[in-house]
Amino acid sequence: MLNLVSIDKRFGNLPALSAITIEFGRNETVGLIGPNGSGKTTLVNVATAIYGPDSGKILFKGADITNLGAHRIFRLGIARTFQNLRHFPRMTALANVEAAQYGIPGNSLLHLLLGNRRTARSLRENAEWALEQVGLQDVRDRLANALPLPQLRRLEIARILARDPELVFLDEPAGGMTPAESEDMARLIVERVTPNRTCIVIEHKIELIVQVCSRVCVLDAGLLIADGNPRQVLALPAVAEAYLGREAAVA
């Protein structure tokens, strides 16, 4: 589905990614983990054209998308969330999900400005469906800035579902959550996001990675140091040293 081939990325003299080659298969759920500064979010930013790679290639379903802009990447069926929530705080939850659908082929703000009622109705119905999928139908008319963090994280998932992408990057979907809230988020990802999609999850909470992902890739200092079954990878001494540090490995 997505191939990253010999990706290098530098910021000044600092190598952020070095010769990264990873293949993410169709309908595969992969965890991307590593210590702070290991290059996880940089890798996602390169894959989604927020940054361009200094060298290497990015292939999506066999097509070279290395030099495409972010807006064209997303139109191909790739979507993502961000570590820092990106929503419209003074818009309702429903309006936030409606807005996420602009740019999908066949939908545009121009249609609404020209009074295309069919398009507007379709966007709203799809947004209502997405909110129901994540359990936010009861707060659809509340402003986003009035929602607590767990609901804002779910709102991000609803915006993803409304776009119905083939490939999703989730960047710390349980960031700032309690263990119980993280458990709920893991269940939501498994039940609503991963079916029939390729999903790459960037997360520091190892319990969520083990619960959600069938494979894990570990980055350290911009290098890919391990790739395989989560429990086997987490048991590797190099991974324990680089990522877990003093934390206990998952039993």
Image (cartoon, rainbow, N blue to C red):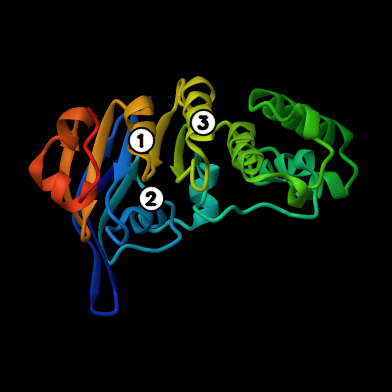
The residue identified by callout 2 is 65
Please say if the residues under marks 3 and 1 sit with CB atoms less than 8 Å apart.
no
Instruction: Sort mark 1 into few (<14), some (14-19) or many (20+) by Cα contacts within 10 Å.
Output: few
Instruction: Check disc 3 and report its element: helix, strand or loop.
Output: helix
Comparing 71 with 131, the one in front is: 131
Residue at image position (80%, 55%) is 90
Question: Which x, y percent locates residue 211?
Answer: 36, 25
In this rendering, position of residue 116 left or right of residue 7: right
**Residue 17 at x, y = what percent?**
24, 61
Residue 35, quarter of the rendered image:
bottom left
Reply above or below: 55 against 213: below
Q: Is residue 1 visible?
A: no
**Residue 180: mark:** 3
Q: Position of residue 196 (x, y in %)?
A: 45, 21
**Mark 1 belongs to which amino acid?**
Lys
Q: Badge 3: few (under 14), some or many (20 or more) residues near its Cα, within 10 Å? A: few
The amino acid on which the numbered mark 2 sits, given as a three-letter code, is Ile
When the figure is inspected, residue 240 is found, relative to residue 213, above or below; the finding is below
Amino acid type of disc 3? Answer: Ala
Q: Which quadrant would the N terminus be assigned to in this image?
A: top left
Where's residue 78, x and y in %?
A: 48, 41
Mark earlier in primary sequence (3, 1): 1
Residue plotted at (29% across, 79% down): 12
Q: Quadrant of the C terminus?
A: top left
What residue appears at the point 10 percent right and 47 percent down from the top-left corner? 238
- Residue 9 visible within the image: yes
Q: What residue is pinned by disc 1?
A: 61
Camera-nearest residue between 26 and 43? 43
Separation of residues labelled 1 and 2 (CA atoms): 10 Å
Q: Is residue 186 above or below residue 155?
A: above
